Amino acid sequence: MRLRHLRFVCLRGLIFVFVRPTLGEPSLAPRVDPRVELLSIVFRLAGNSEYNMSPLKTYTADIDAYFSPYKEHPAVALARKLAGEREVGFDAVMGLAVHLSPAPALKPLVAFTDDIPDARFGKDNAILFAQRLADFYRDTHFDKFFAAHQSFYHLATERFRVVLNDLDLDWYKSFYGDVRMGQYHLILGMNNGGGNYGPRVVWPNGHEQFFSIIGCWTQDDSGTPTYSTDYLDAIIHEFNHSFVNPAFAKHKSEFASARQVFERVADKMRAQAYGNSDTMVIESLVRAAVIQYMESRGHESREVRYLMRGEQLTGFAWMDELVDLLHQYSSQRSHYRTFESFIPVVAQFYRSLAPRISEKIARFSQRCVHVSGMQPFPNHSEDADPAIKELVITFDKALDPQAGPKHHGYSISLGPDGNEHFPISGAPEFLPGNLSIKLPVVLKPDWNYSFVLTPLAFASQDGYPLESYTVAFKTKR
């Protein structure tokens, strides 16, 4: 889970698409799945925050207008209860979606157990919820809502094609040494916001289905979805889960020492909905594997380095060592024929990491960029001069002016006070030496201002990111 060409035309049926991948050619058809939208909407109505963060305001307004009379429907009430009592949310919701047959039946595709589709549901709750979900589908005439938005879904799938130009599905078999036969499915979750998920369905005969469910976190001025190649790593990430998760499960008992590591990064992990050490280990491996993919596809070393440093900043401070460990795996494939056979080496790595994790975190933080000062008045000033036309922010390390997705070296977002309190009025400018950046501002008297310097682009010459920094001040009368 991560907080990223056939057109789907069958409303009541489910089209499974599998095309044998050809190196360098997009071979996966993105589609919008009624089951994913249905589950996402029910948990939106139940109040789950992760299904209430979509930036596609026109679409979410349609959802709220159409389904608001059903906020107390038994399916929504049960979703609310399960979310509160059993922490059902995030990937558990999407996992259930792909384990159900096409609407309107919405029956289990495989036998539900206490762990299938997810332990957070449990067998009885999953079966009951599927029944209530079928009632919700019928009672709300969900098919009419879905049909009414076909042009919106079609626009999304067409725009998503740009993301697939560098997608190589052959890489999974090569990297994991996995001979399982399976189908890859790419689904666009239109109400999922920045939430991306990688569930897997295993059939009784051993056949598998691998899913990458990608949300949407960008839009144009008309409120319709936009996509770029920035979404590619989300696809790679989520498909990795179909291989990493079962490999880890076979050796779960060997990772007891990872709990010590988790204790030191628990706040950052839980902020990403990673609530235990098992999830932390799985996510670390998935993210390290994404970096391996980027390297295999010839991405620039600078891009790969920034990706790795970004993972370290999110809490995986040991990502550089883990990436090196996977390099060892890749270079010794005559000995480690499958990824699963290498997992005991990963377990040993976590045993060695546990006693030195505090030192590792401290060393990474020291190498990151920090704000050292602001002129002509300090941060948090209560009497700033409204006549000021520019701010200069200084850092403790020289920055890379070409860092970030847009290669302009800076990334600034709205502060906690919102758009009306955002003072920056033009393009920032790096000063000689790249230790400072000049920000043009327009201020008025007696007003609060705020903005956030983010690690999305601010980074040192060797790729270490800025630790997020909020600027807030008030002008005098």
Image: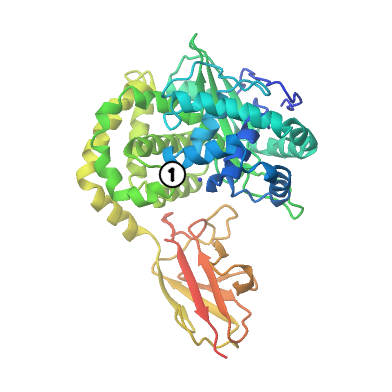
Q: Residue furthest top?
A: 205
> Left of 25 or right of it: where is 93?
left
- Can residue 25 be seen at all in this image of the molecule? no
In the figure, residue 391 lies in which quadrant?
bottom right
Amino acid under disc 1: Ala
Q: Taking 413 as reference, is 162 above or below it?
A: above
- Can residue 403 be seen at all in this image of the molecule? yes
Residue 66: x and y, percent? 73, 43
Q: Nearer the viewer, residue 132 or 383?
A: 132
Q: Secondary structure at mark 1?
A: loop
Q: Residue furthest left?
A: 355
Residue 415: x and y, percent? 54, 67
Report which residue position mark 1 lands on: 273
Residue 86: x and y, percent? 42, 37
Q: Taking 31 as reference, is 269 above or below it?
A: below
Q: Taking 427 as reference, is 161 above or below it?
A: above
Q: Nearer the viewer, residue 392 or 112?
A: 112
Q: Nearer the viewer, residue 411 or 165?
A: 411
Q: Nearer the viewer, residue 100 or 223?
A: 100
Residue under the point 63% across and 40% down: 41
Residue 40: x and y, percent? 60, 38
Q: Taking 66 as reference, is 405 above or below it?
A: below
